[in-house]
Amino acid sequence: MKKSKKPNTRALKRRKKFLRGLRHFLLTPVLVCLLLFAVIFAISTPFLSDFYSIGSMFLQDSEPVYSHTYENIFTPSDNSGDTVNAEDVDYPSIDKQFGTLEIDNRGVDTKLFFGDGYVPLRNGAGVYAGSFIPGYGKTILVSGHNNTYFNGLKNVKKGDIVKIRTSYGNYKYRVTKTLIADADDKSTYDLSADKENLVMYTCYPFDELGLTEQRFFVYADKISGPQIVGIYE
Amino acid sequence: MKKLFKKLSLKKVLYAVLTFILALCLIFGSLITILRITFFNGSFLSDTLNSSQYYNDLCVEIAENLSDLGDASGLDKSFFEGFVSEVLVRDDVQSYITDFYEGNPLKVNTSNFDESLQNALKKYIKTNHIKNVNDESLEYFSAKASRIYSNSIKIKYFSAVQDIIVNNTGLLTSLIVVLALISAAICVILIVTNAWKHKALRYIYTALSSAGLFLLILPICVFASGVIGHIAIMSRSLSDMYISILSTVLSDMIVISIVLIVVAVAVWVIHTRVRKKSAV
Amino acid sequence: MKKLCALLLAVFLVIVSCSSAFAAGINAAEQSVLGNMRTPANMNGHKVYVPTAYINQAEAHFNTIDMTQQQADKINSLINAGRAFLEGTGKSNIKELSASERQTLLSYASQAAAVLKLTAVAGSDETRIKITTKDGTVIVDESNNIIKTTGFSPLTVPIAFASLIFVVLILASAGLVLIKKRELKNEEI
């Protein structure tokens, strides 16, 4: 005769009680928490979506770097030919040294940076980032401090040769004129020019102490160096 | 389905809504409390700056900016070496913070700095026998140096929020009191109107624990994402300051969440005891 | 098996086509964006242009990336929307915009920044603006004047037209404080 197995009702009741307790202790608060997130998110999205998208514009992928060291992407080249392909040019980003600038017998021999902020001007001469690099066929606007790297500009005369060396080519420019003008005189440069021209400037007078309103400009036209081709598809 | 609707009586729905509102009150009350003890509290900012590298970094930055100005003005790099006094910077920043929280115009008194600069310039000109000196150029230089110093002392973007903070500090305190009263009222309603007291305590536990979880998850997600350290700010001192403040705010959220969760657990323990008592 | 190989090949080709082997140069998509940036906004009869310096900086940055047509379409639509918005305000220049109007421009800028994965660096100096890529490479580091001076020359670089990629990012990065305190002069015509 088979004995019928009766369910252990006490154990079952205890288990049910435990599960109910677990539900109230853990599950319900978690569900309510999720509901709170959903409600607060739904209410705040119309107000915060703009804030969030604007805020995310100020976030980088990594921690910001405050070092004053700069990257040097310049390696001497022997290309003084007529052209260089755009795809062979490592276009510099701001604060990178990408070449050297030298004016023979005038005391100007300096590193050349892209950008003219604090890092470039502390370490050499800087190409204004709103202008272009040698070979691009447009205006190259270069600045330097008059008591350091561009002090030699005071000796520059018409006809002097300016040599710029980059990783993609070596360039020569002939000085056509010098000019003393106010710093806010916009006629001293043309950033939309379609012909390659080099404009170097520094503070003037050279040995005067203090902040001067005038600048000493040196203009030069290209005489040799590879033109960057294939820029525009 | 019918069983489910039978279980969901109007009373239960009302209690659920009250629990939800209680949780919301606890969350907003906690957040407003954190705001009140941090952004809306002058001594919090002073303490944060004192305990961080802010003044040291700020002095270095001011010296660098002045050195760049010196480069553009024909001065030796050595002119500004050791020129910026951390004591002076600290005093000026503290005055700025005091003016900020008192609603005074945010102007930096640069008279000490200007005097030091003029004395240093006179000494430099005499020592180096400099003849090519234009008073106007020197005046521009001095004014710019003064402006660099003044702009460095001012904590950026604070001026934009001064009115909000000064005019709403009292409002925040009132809001905290109101939310606390509402929370207390809801707890009383739950206890008084519920025949089963242990169920009332369970509702209160749910509100406390869910609010605690909410306030815990948010800062953990922010810390885990590492987004705080990725804010792009030009100045190291400013960046360190904002990171310290944000970290403190998020840590306060974690502390409050732990308090809420501990209180919730205590309420749960009381709930189980009351339940056992009523079962007997 | 054949289908799997074909699928794998297709996936591989997609991945390869996305990598920018030759980022140098200005492709057609980038040229369309530059051309759009050169188009002025007509603000209440005043033609307002993006400063040449900013367009040049955009071109410099485009020489280091390969913008897709999809990205260019998105950015052009944002520029067009921003221009239409500015023209619709009835104001003569950006200085006259209300706080909510600037907010709208900022939201356009942030969408453009998201497309090109750019970061606006909050300035410690009201007169300086910095924009980087998300990995920190600087693409714009602009101060008040093209000809560098630390004297009291007035602002010579006008923020005349909110180019959604650069000028509005400049507004965004400097915040409303910059707009309030800068003197806008010399609108380019």
Image (spheres, coloured by chain):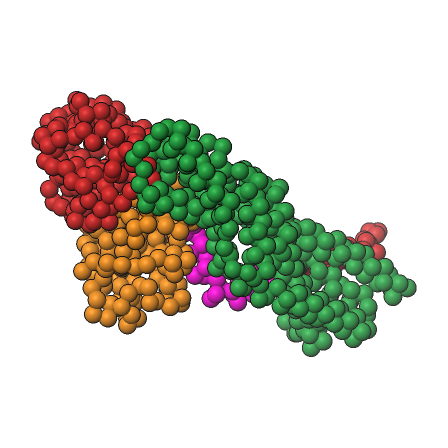
What residue is at 77 percent from the left and 68 percent from the top?
Answer: B200
Q: Nearer the viewer, residue C110 or C57?
A: C57
Most extreme residue toward the right is B280
Q: Which residues are magenta?
A: A35-58
The structure residue drawn at horizontal position 22% and vertical position 46%, both measured from the top left corner, is A182
The correct choice, above or below, for C155 with respect to B145 in the image is below
Residue C170 part of the magenta-drawn span = no
Residue C134 in sight from this viewpoint: no
Drawing shade for chain C: orange
Q: Is residue A191 visible?
A: yes
Quadrant in the picture for residue A168: top left
Q: Quadrant of the C terminus of chain B?
A: bottom right
| Colour in which the image shows chain B | green
Please provide percent x and percent y for residue C125. Answer: 41, 48
- Report the quarter where the N terminus of chain B lies: bottom right
Q: Colour of chain A?
A: red
Return the x and y of residue B178 as percentages of the image width and height. 68, 70
Q: Position of residue B188 (x, y in %)?
A: 78, 71
Count of numbered marks: 0
Q: Quadrant of residue C140?
A: top left
User: From the viewer's perspective, is C93 left or right of A11?
Assistant: left
Residue A206, image x, y percentages: 26, 34
Q: Residue at x 72, y 53 (%)?
A: B259
Residue B201 falls left or right of residue B157: right
| Residue at 74% in and 57% down | B264
- Secondary structure mostly seen in the magenta stretch: helix
Q: Is residue A40 magenta?
A: yes
Q: Is residue A202 above or below residue A171?
A: below
C104 left or right of C24? right
